Amino acid sequence: MRIAWISHEAFLGGAQLSFLEAARGMVDRGHTIHAILPGREELAGPLEQAGVTVSVHRYTWWVVVSGPWRAPRYRVRRLARNLIAARDLARFFRDWRPDVVVSNTLAVPSGAFGARLARVPHAWYVHELFGKENDLYFDLGVPLSLALMDRLSARLVACSRAVRDQLLCRIPASKIRVVYYAVEVPPQAPTPQRDDGVLRLVMASRLAPAKRQEDAILALGMLAKRGVNARLELVGRERPDYGQFLRNLARERDVLDRVDFRPFTDNPHGCVAASDVALMCSRGEGFGRVTVEAMKVGRPVVGADSGGTAELIRDGWNGLLYRRGDAADLAAKLEGLWRDRALLQSMGRNAQEWSRETFNLDRYAPGLLEALAECVS
């Protein structure tokens, strides 16, 4: 199969890493992939090393975070740019002749419009929750946008049941397939068990309001008052205003000396392996790749009971769920793990065994290929 695959970003985020894993699995199975990126940045090199041809095209999003960019004049400009990009992509599709076009996000519509103009089947691979959950809003509104996604696609692939369930508000279930990622994690050196009375917490995620790192800092303050010796490591790119907000909050709660802010790294697994517990505080993850990454290095995850996180954590078995936005409940769950190291370690073992069996290329690549084959047929 010849597959044209469109990414909304050229940086190594969760959706892009899933694309890279899919590309490796499909190329190894004899399929040809041409990646279309908005730039070369971090993703182009690894894709080319995997045997994927890469080209750069200019297009833009049709979703936006809350703020001034939602103003009508900006929406019109984005629509115009996407229509121009659709024409250019259609020309490319006619020349390259893919069997199917995949848009690796709901954020970019140009590939779907271009595929329709070139009369090539299209699949939408959806990784995101939209609306308040992720601060993502469609320029054209939800009803019209989902109607277009339905009309322009032979199949929609969802990365989780949570994403599928949100799409079901406008798109028939018969058109949607759920395919879990592989989530490849490089081998980590074994971390010796510690019994020094410190609970080491880590949250590896972009620092932004939708990720709610504030829950972790508030819980840390509560733990300190109860005599629980805990430290928190925040790893990821910062939205500057939110990063400053978090530092101010930690200072107010008198725990700034217990919080380490680390810059983004494309290999945060060492930080996670050096921790005791990973946190996932987001309002609503479409999947929660970092949750599975933490499990694969043998760390239980304490996460908000929402979105894909609630789908991945089996409460009390491979991690714990707390009420979304409730820092007091998060603190209570963490204090329980601090007092019961045996439970913490058993959940880590369960998490590692389950994640390795569930999220791998032997399941991921065939699941995607089956959905794409349905598009072609």
Image: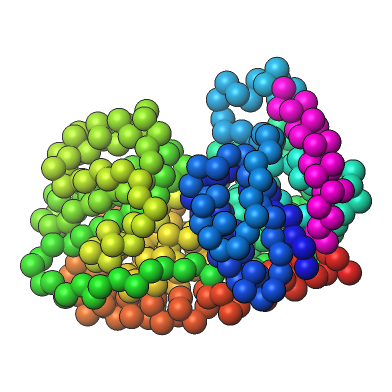
Q: Is residue 195 above or below residue 130?
A: below
Looking at the image, which residue is at 30% across and 81% down? Answer: 346
Query: Which image quarter is the C terminus in?
Result: bottom right
Q: Residue furthest left?
A: 196
Say whether residue 62 is magenta: no
Looking at the image, which residue is at 42% across and 39% down? Answer: 208
Instruction: For residue 344, say whether it is visible.
Output: yes
Q: Give the camera-side residue of 67 and 8.
A: 8
Say whether residue 88 is magenta: yes
Say which quarter of the image contains residue 78: top right
Q: Give the camera-side residue of 223 and 214.
A: 214
Q: Is residue 342 above or below residue 181?
A: below
The answer to whether 253 appears left or right of 289 in the picture is left
Say which quarter of the image contains residue 214: top left
Q: Which residues are magenta?
A: 77-100
Query: Which image quarter is the N terminus in?
Result: bottom right
The answer to whether 120 appears left or right of 316 in the picture is right
Residue 137 image position (x, y, % from top left) = 64, 36
Q: Is residue 2 above or below residue 140?
A: below
Residue 206 image position (x, y, % from top left) = 41, 44
The answer to whether 341 appears left or right of 24 in the picture is left
* Dominant secondary structure of the residues highlighted in magenta in the image: helix
Looking at the image, which residue is at 74% across and 55% down? Answer: 4
Say which quarter of the image contains residue 50: bottom right
Residue 330 image position (x, y, % from top left) = 32, 56
Residue 22 image position (x, y, % from top left) = 61, 65
Looking at the image, which residue is at 72% across and 22% down? Answer: 77
Q: How many marks do you count on the picture? A: 0
Q: Is residue 70 above or below residue 45?
A: above
Instruction: For residue 326, say whether it is visible.
Output: no
